[in-house]
Image (tube, rainbow, N blue to C red):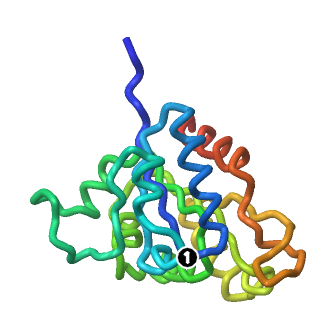
Amino acid sequence: MEKPKKNIILGVTASIAIYKACELVRRLKECGFTVKVIMTKEAEELIKPIVFASLSGNRVYRAGIFDEPDTWQVEHVSLAEEADLILIAPATANIIAKLSAGICDDLLTCTVCASKANLLIAPAMNEFMYNNKITQSNIAKLKSCGYKFIAPRKGMLACGKVGLGCLAGPEDIVKEVKRSLIS
């Protein structure tokens, strides 16, 4: 008997590392996972949803929580219920702050709030933003709530400097996804 596929919601936010999310979708699918992407409105300024739809083979869910639904389900609740794992990669300081404060003002934050699934967050931002006391406090608060983080690595940042804040490598993220789904 074939094991049922695990459902992963990939939350994509507006970091320059967004292009790595494309590789993540491909690798997660190769592992046999079903991947559904939720993009923030700001992420759509960097890459078009059609890219993620093509890679995932699924509709891309977009920012608006009051958009006309395809079905008569409450979208953020139905997505939350079917998720075995929610992965946010890349995760900006903004999304981390919103989750830490309990702000539910878009489809991604509402889905996270409505879900009982494990949550993995892979930050990607400028080193100063990542090391900012407020960002670190937000990360600590989310960790205390049981959210797991995949630490960024040191490398070339969008500002042209080398520092801590690069999105973890796709292979490291996939390894953490598998580990989270086993536990």
23 and 172: which one is in front? 23
Classify 4 as above or below 146. above
Q: Residue furthest left?
A: 72
Amino acid type, callout 1:
Ala
Q: Work out whether residue 46 or residue 172 is closer to the camera in this orientation and state it.
A: 46
From the viewer's perspective, tell me whether residue 10 is left or right of residue 104: right
Left or right position of 120 against 110: right
Residue 34 found in image quarter: top left
- Residue drawn at point x = 54 percent, y = 65 percent: 145
Give the position of the N terminus as an image quadrant: top left
Residue 14 x/y as whole percent: 55, 76
Q: Is residue 30 above or below residue 105?
A: above
Looking at the image, residue 102 sits to the left or right of residue 15; the answer is left
- Disc 1: CA contacts within 10 A as few (<14), some (14-19) or many (>=20): many
| Residue 16: image location, x then y, percent | 65, 74
> For the residue labelled by badge 1, is the local secondary structure a helix, a strand or a loop?
loop
Describe residue 74's horizontal placement relative to residue 63 as left or right.
left
Residue 77 spot, x, y in % from top left: 26, 60
Q: Which residue is mark 1?
A: 14
Tell me which corner region of the image, top left, top right, bottom left or bottom right, holds residue 128. bottom right
Which residue corresponds to the image point at 59% horizontal and 70% vertical from the top-left? 91
Q: Check the picture and name the quadrant holding the C terminus.
A: top right
